[in-house]
Amino acid sequence: MSCFLTVKNLFKEYEGCRALRGVNFGLEKGDFLSLFGPNGAGKSTLLGIVSTLVSPSSGQIEIKGFDLTEEPEQFKKQLGVISHNSLLYDHMTALENLIFYASLYKVKAPENRAVELLRVVELYPRRHSRVGQFSRGMRQRLSVARALVNDPALLLLDEPYSGLDQYAAAILTEQLAELKSKERTVIMVTHNLDHGLNSATKVGILSAGCLVFMEERDSVDPALFEVEYLRHVQGAVRA
Ligand code: ADP
Ligand code: MG
């Protein structure tokens, strides 16, 4: 196990449902994996397990050699997560939310870090507004800032573009490009081929709990990849 991230023989069974059936892959530092797959394929389960929110039935995961079950605290320190749950507090302002998370992660000078990130996601002018009043796009941008607060080595994004308008999507794309230039490692689940292929160094397809496709981005022809992806989506509809 010498990769930055190693996922080995990962299985997850919910009651009566086999969500992951032996998933194996590795990522190097700086890799950006775009993960595609039909609804119900197990994508959120996989990200949930790597983000430590869902416990695996069996298998092994390591980040920088830290084992998920043996060294959970070291493992968690490496993570930033953007999922369906924004993890933001509606009754608090944007600034208060970020200061809260910065303090939680013991970031030095939490307020400075919060202000810096608010500028990055272009929410600084709204820093004193309560998050409960934010639009979907604004919440999503603030979630990006929240996930970056500890400068995570591994960022997990579950459908981060869903519900974003073009403006918010463009800010997110810019943010992701910046992460790539900083050699951060990213796993992004998306249904959007353009977004997924543009950002990626690796592309994967998860289908019925199995990783059925995993290639270097540069060796993938977008048109052929689309056919492969649609084949699995249609297969899932028929199943
Ligand atoms: P995806 O994100 O690819 O759409 P999920 O990981 O959400 O897929 O779900 C994979 C499978 O696991 C689905 O069949 C789903 O119904 C099931 N599943 C997900 N979460 C739970 C849960 N908490 N309890 C029971 N079954 C679940
Ligand atoms: Mg999902």
Image (cartoon, rainbow, N blue to C red):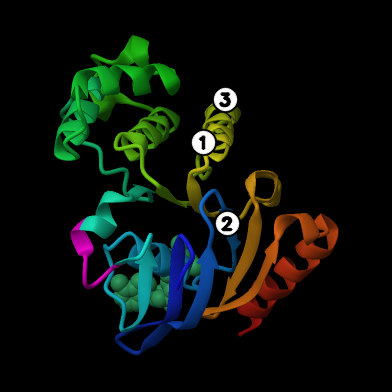
At a point 61% along the width and 85% down the height, the residue shown is 239
The residue shown at (49%, 79%) is 23
Dot 2: within a 10 Å radius of its alpha carbon, few (fewer than 14), some, or many (20 or more) residues?
many
Whether 86 is drawn above or below 65: the answer is above
Mark 3 lies on residue = 167
Q: Is residue 198 visible?
A: yes
Residue occupying the point 62% across, 69% down:
205
- On screen, residue 54 versus residue 20, left or right, reads left
- Going by the numbered disc 3, the residue's amino acid type is Tyr
Residue 163 coordinates in the image, percent (x, y): 50, 41
Let me know if residue 83 is in the magenta part: no
Residue found at the far top of this picture: 125
Identify the element where label 1 is drawn.
loop
Q: What kind of residue is marked 1?
A: Lys
Which badge, 1 or 3, is on the more N-terminal residue?
Answer: 3
Res. 159 in view: no
The region drawn magenta spans: 67-73
Q: How many marks?
A: 3
Between the residue at mark 3 and the residue at mark 2, the CA separation in whole angstroms equals 23 Å
Respond yes or no on whether mark 2 lies under 8 Å from ligand 1. no
Disc 1: which residue: 182
Q: Nearer the viewer, residue 5 or 117?
A: 5
Q: Is residue 6 left or right of residue 35?
A: left
Residue named by callout 2: 33
Query: Could you tell me if the residues under marks 1 and 3 are in contact, i.e. CB atoms within 8 Å?
Result: no
Where is residue 89 drawn, in percent x and y? 20, 35
Q: Residue furthest front?
A: 2
> Disc 2 versus disc 1: distance between alpha carbons?
15 Å
Q: Earlier in the sequence, mark 2 or mark 1?
A: 2
- Secondary structure state at the residue bearing disc 3: helix
